Image: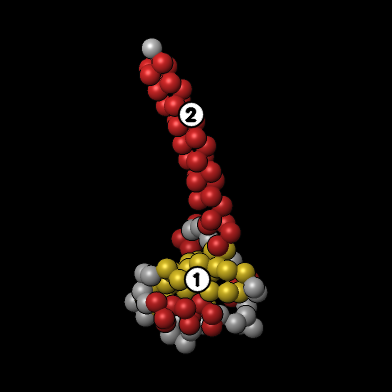
Amino acid sequence: NLVANTPGNTFLFDQKNKIFAATNKELLNPSIDHSPVLNAYKLNGDNNFFSYKLNNEERLGACTKVFAYTACITESADIINKPIFKAAYIQVIALIVMISISVILLYFIVSK
């Protein structure tokens, strides 16, 4: 049950490109088309990140061969980008504060 403890949507393809293990049990439904993930993986190769569209939503993923199987992990780009944008926002605010403090200190040093 190690697959269930991983983040994102983790799943394993067999030799016939059918999913046989997944963290999201809905992905085991044989009627779901997994060709966008497989095509992106074939273009990018093992252990390389790729992006693909699914239902007009950008998703990010990575796959690798594990013995005779293909292991993939995918996630919505929005979920991945949210903490990145938050960190960038915090850094911009910190930069503005540091510049303001530097200008004020420089003003007092030069004015004396």
Classify mark 2: helix, strand or loop: helix
Which residue type does callout 1 highlight?
Ser
Vertical position of residue 98 compared to residue 17: above or below? above
Q: Position of residue 2 (x, y in %)?
A: 46, 60
Q: Is residue 47 left or right of residue 25?
A: left
Pointer 1 residue: 51
Residue farthest front in this picture: 111
Q: Earlier in the sequence, mark 2 or mark 1?
A: 1
Classify mark 1: helix, strand or loop: strand
Q: Residue at x 48, y 68 (%)?
A: 61
Q: Position of residue 102 (x, y in %)?
A: 42, 27
Which mark, by number, is residue 10? none
The quarter of the rendered structure image containing the C terminus is: top left
Total labels: the figure holds 2
Vertical position of residue 94 compared to residue 43: above or below? above
Q: Residues within 10 Å of mark 1 (few under 14, many from 20)?
A: some
Vertical position of residue 98 compared to residue 69: above or below? above
Pointer 2 residue: 100
